[in-house]
Amino acid sequence: MTMSRFLNGAEASRQYGVLAGHYAASLMWSDPLADAAADALRPLGKSWWPMVLKALDAGARTMPDLPPALAALLAALPPEPTDDQRAAMEMGRAAIARTGNSAALIVQCTSLVIDGRSPPTGTSSQQAIRRLGETGDWWIKLHAPDGLRRGAEGYKATLRVRLGNAFRRRAVRDAGTWDRRAWGEPLNQDDLFVQVSAFTAVMLEGLHRMGYRLTQAEKDGYYAFWRHAAAVLGLHKTWLEMIDAERCGQFWKMWLLVNPPPDAETKARASRAMDELARVGGSVAFLDRALLSGMTHWLLGRDVAQGLGVPNGPMTYLLPAIYPPTSFLSQRLGGSRERRLARMVAALARS
């Protein structure tokens, strides 16, 4: 079956082999456990999340009226890491968190690219901007110290993202406009894995370009961190085993190859999102807009940036010269930068 989200299939198979086959199959994989739990929680309206939190904190056995589908989802969550695994994960997380707003800039740029190459889900431009804020809020909570420990705010936020994806899948299916044959399942396993690839391989490569030098142990720990986070997020075990530097890097490149380029509508949405990111950045808006545009060209490449309609400018050429020499200040400035990011994502979430 030829899919519009699997263009250049022969070239993808030639370059990436088995990975391309996994991609083609995963377009039809969603998250059955989360989908069933979301369907069971839907009649509860806005009270569904307090029930999930209570079950997560107190345990499903203490709640005899808990929907069986939710109990099954919670029972299938990954076991807590060992002390050695936790220490490695924490080392990787802390290394990224120390970079402050530098990592956040990469998250923003890659999120714009992912949104710009994903099929339409019927969401408005304003809803897409709000999602950027929600992604940033989740990322901040996840990267807090011990944020991925069961019951921590980052862990809870990750579980909420998983169930939120399931609610969105149902809404998209019910709308009747989704072309499953062309696009696969909405918010499928490939969509999850490209986000993980952006937050790992693209993140680490971007920070290296910015001048940060992480040890191999810190990089390995960060991949371990995301293997656990992705398991909570509902990524299939086939993909969990592929969360490493080589395959996450390959997947990002393959995803850009096989997905159709942004159309005029998605380019316009990306431009509005970038304007909004600049507006709430807490600085001079046009400077933040130029910074985001330059970062997208510098970190993700000219072809990707131009395909998204991101304008080129002086920052594209200035950043490689001025950013790395100042990266040694990131730890000292990290606190203020993180507070600035927190203000930004809060403003986006209110948009």
Image (cartoon, rainbow, N blue to C red):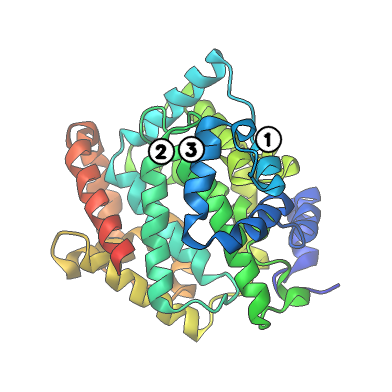
Three-letter code for the amino acid on which mark 1 is drawn? Ala
Three-letter code for the amino acid on which mark 3 is drawn? Tyr
At a point 40% along the width and 57% down the height, the residue shown is 134
The secondary structure type at the circle numbered 2 is helix
In front: 280, or 95?
280
Q: Quadrant of the C terminus?
A: bottom left
Q: Quadrant of the N terminus?
A: bottom right
Outermost residue on the right side: it is 1
Q: Which numbered circle lies on residue 155?
A: 3
Answer with the quarter of the image where residue 213 lies. Answer: top left
Q: Which numbered circle lies on residue 75?
A: 1
At a point 36% along the width and 50% down the height, the residue shown is 137
The secondary structure type at the circle numbered 3 is helix
- Count of numbered circles on the image: 3
> Which of marks 3 and 1 precedes in the sequence?
1
Three-letter code for the amino acid on which mark 2 is drawn? Glu
Q: Measure the C-alpha gap from mark 2 to mark 1.
A: 19 Å
Would you name the residue on which mark 2 appears? 153
